[in-house]
Amino acid sequence: MPHRLNETFVEWFGEMFTGMDDWGSAYADRRWRIGLVHVQIGIGPQHVVPAMTNVVNEVGKHLKMAGLSENLRDSLGRICMIDLAFIEQAYVEVSLQAVMRETGWSEGLFKRMISTGASSVLS
Ligand code: HEM
């Protein structure tokens, strides 16, 4: 794990289970902010994805050793993937906003350029 088990990390972990405001907008805002913090310090999605996999695997092992149900492990995997989606989306959103701000392009134009770019890489 790249993270020490510091206070914020432990809080993050706990919040997945308390759901803060029943997994509502406060929960979403908090996840969004965590994503932005990583974007700001330059930690790319390629690092966050394996880190989250470690969390799921390691915690899953403990749940298994404690004889807890497989449903619990499934739920852990799901909520971690939802959190991961928020963190990943922060990268996309920040990049999009930065390009739009710097170039004056619309979101539609940016997205068209991305799909055109993908088509030319694929062909
Ligand atoms: C499972 C994936 C990860 C989770 C859930 C996570 C969670 C967090 C949280 C909750 C914070 C505090 C955010 C705040 O201040 O509001 C944070 C900050 C930070 N994270 Fe992560 N992180 C993850 C992956 C990574 C990875 C892969 C790295 C480095 C390779 C990293 C490095 C940092 C650093 C340097 C900070 C700022 C200082 C600190 O609070 O330790 N994180 N992260």
Image: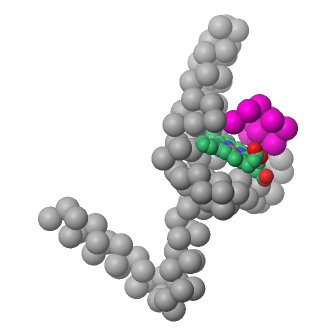
Task: Identify the residue at image location x=71%, y=53%.
Answer: 34
Task: Identify the residue at image location x=52%, y=65%.
Answer: 92
For this orientation, the residue located farthest to the left is 123
Res. 6 visible in picture: yes
Which quadrant of the render holds ligand 1? top right
Check if residue 46 falls in the magenta segment: no
> Looking at the picture, does residue 80 appear above or below residue 115?
above
Q: How many marks?
A: 0
The magenta segment: 3-18
Q: For the N terminus, give its image quadrant.
A: top right
Of residues 75 and 95, the one nearer the viewer is 95
Res. 28 visible in picture: no
Instruction: Report x, y in % for residue 64.
Output: 62, 12
Task: Identify the residue at image location x=61%, y=15%.
Answer: 61
Residue 59: image quadrant is top right
Of residues 2 and 101, the one nearer the viewer is 2
Instruction: Report x, y in % for residue 14.
Output: 80, 35
Instruction: Report x, y in % for residue 102.
Output: 54, 86
Task: Identify the residue at image location x=85%, y=38%.
Answer: 7
For this orientation, the residue located farthest to the front is 41
Q: Main secondary structure of the magenta part?
A: helix
Q: For the C terminus, give its image quadrant.
A: bottom left
Residue 118: image quadrant is bottom left
